[in-house]
Image (cartoon, grey):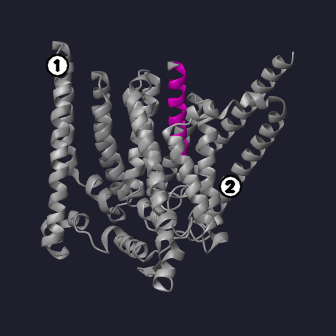
Amino acid sequence: MNKKSNKNDVSIQKSLTQYIVYIYVLFLIGLYPLLFKNGYTDILDFKSSSYLNINIIMFLFLSFLFLTWIPSNYKSIGNLKDNMKSVSLTDWFVLGFGLVLTISWLFSDEMAESFWGTSGRMFGYLAIMFCVLGYFIISRYLKFDQVILWSFLLCGMLVYIIAIFNFFQIDILGMYKFGWQNGSFISTLGNVNSLACYSSIILPIGMTLFCVSKKKLSAWIYGIFCILGFFGMVASSSDSIFCSVIVSFLILFWFLNEVWEVKKYLILAGTFILSLQGITIVHHILINKDDLLVGLARIFALNRKMLIFLPVIILLYLGITICEKKGIEKQVLKKTKTIFFLVVGLIAVTGFLGIVFLNLRYEKVEVVNKFGAIGNYLYFDKWWGSCRGTNWIYSIQVFREFDLKHKFIGEGPASFVYALRNCFNGDVYSLDKKIIDAHNEFFQFLITTGVFGVISYFGIYISSIKRSIKIYKNNQFLIAVIICLISYLVQGMINNPHIYTTPLIFWVIAVGENQLRDASIKQQ
């Protein structure tokens, strides 16, 4: 009788835990990105407090459930050896990252500020640790289903729709009435870089699902989402999302092995070009302010020569259809992919060597005169990427000045600004703005959590990608996870971890782990 009662207690505890985690995830992916208060004036404080509060509430409930369950079910916990077997490589990296964060915070000179992140966009020790703890809870207890996925994408659609209205200077939410007329703020994610970071997470997932979905209705919904996402790319006018999406397109092609998938891929590529060109044509007719677009958005969306690729895509589609009728599509596709990626690899190596040569041989003025606007991207100096080069140069200088302890564990979470102060005896400015972060995830974690933090943080991504690649053929959602993580790493080269978006990428990693664990259980 006692054994049966214990089993019922375990079942009830597990069901309640899954229910709580389900609600938490729906808030995180379906509501959190849409939250704001007083336009952009209090958006950071409101979003950060909402994120912290929902995590505190969830973990209080889960702690209560766990503590009430232990006394009568302690034998069900199992022995240490059995539990250790279920800990994956990604789990170990997440655990390591959490440990480094804790040690780094404990040794921080500004523990209170580091804990709350008051000098680092409210993304301090507590917020990052909730990402770490959330990973373990979600990967173990989330019942991932279509409702979760649709909520994620529907929220993204709403974010993009608001951004598109803002792009056409229509303030449907009254976000700008508090004085934030600067074009650097858009939709419900504040700074355009935050929207770009959010897009680097959600857009590659929609792109992948469109290509691999066999259901027509689902494919249509994914397609509409992608169109809105491509519009949102232009609205954000941020270079990082263009880099992420282009890389996502390249990697996505590698994972598509069926002819019907490649056909949908070509449709997606054509839609991408038409979306970029279409929204800027309409914008030019209605607003006639092309100067609002800068950087890669200007190069890709305002350059009508991009339309030349449309007939090429159509010819490729017709060619695949002809090969399919002749029954030679598999062989042709395999050879085409091999040649394509050899060419891409050759271009990448040649381009890298060319950039090194230009930076060693010429001055910036010469490079810009020779290559035009693209020359600003080819020559690296302190002005590169809206002065991101300055942040990176300072980051390298700070790390060089670190003692051995700080090289290993950093200055402390959200303490980049304090590291600069200690190194340069005061606040550091760029273009009259105080530098508070590195604008690069590698340098950000190198300074705040040291070498150990960098190894554990990027180990999370690399291990998750590597493990997902092994079994993606049995679960195609893992393709979306792989491409999403790579896309996020690409944008992370020029953006910061942020309380708006880092919890979402940890959610993706947790869902990937959740799917990998399910696959492992099925194999056993």
Q: How many marks?
A: 2
The residue located at (45%, 57%) in the rendering is: 454
Residue 495 x %, y %: 43, 60
Asked whether residue 182 appears in the rendered view, the answer is no
Image coordinates for residue 104, horizontal then vertical, percent: 57, 64
- In the image, is residue 373 part of the stretch drawn in magenta? no
Look at 44% across and 25% down and name the residue there: 475
Residue nearest the viewer, comparing 36 with 349: 349
- The 10 Å Cα crowd at callout 1, few under 14, some 14 to 19, many 20 or more, is some
Residue of label 1 = 323
Relative to 332, is 19 above or below? below
Residue 314: x %, y % from top left: 20, 32
Snapshot quadrant of residue 219: top left
In this orientation, which residue lies closer to the viewer: 27 or 517? 517
- Name the residue nearer the viewer: 229 or 176: 229
> What crowding class fits label 2: few (fewer than 14 Cα within 10 Å), some (14-19), or many (20 or more)?
some
Above or below: residue 7 compared with residue 414: above
Instruction: Name the amino acid type tagged 1.
Output: Cys
Snapshot quadrant of residue 213: top left
Kind of residue at disc 2: Leu
Residue drawn at the location 56% of the way across and 28% of the way down: 146
The magenta region covers: 506-522
In the image, which disc is placed on residue 473? none
Q: Is residue 47 left or right of residue 464?
A: right
Residue 52: mark: 2
x, y (%) of residue 309? 20, 41
Direction from residue 339 to residue 465 in the image, left or right: right
CA gap, disc 2 to disc 1? 55 Å
Callout 1 secondary element: helix
Q: Earlier in the sequence, mark 2 or mark 1?
A: 2
Q: Quadrant of the N terminus?
A: top right
Predominant SS of the magenta segment:
helix
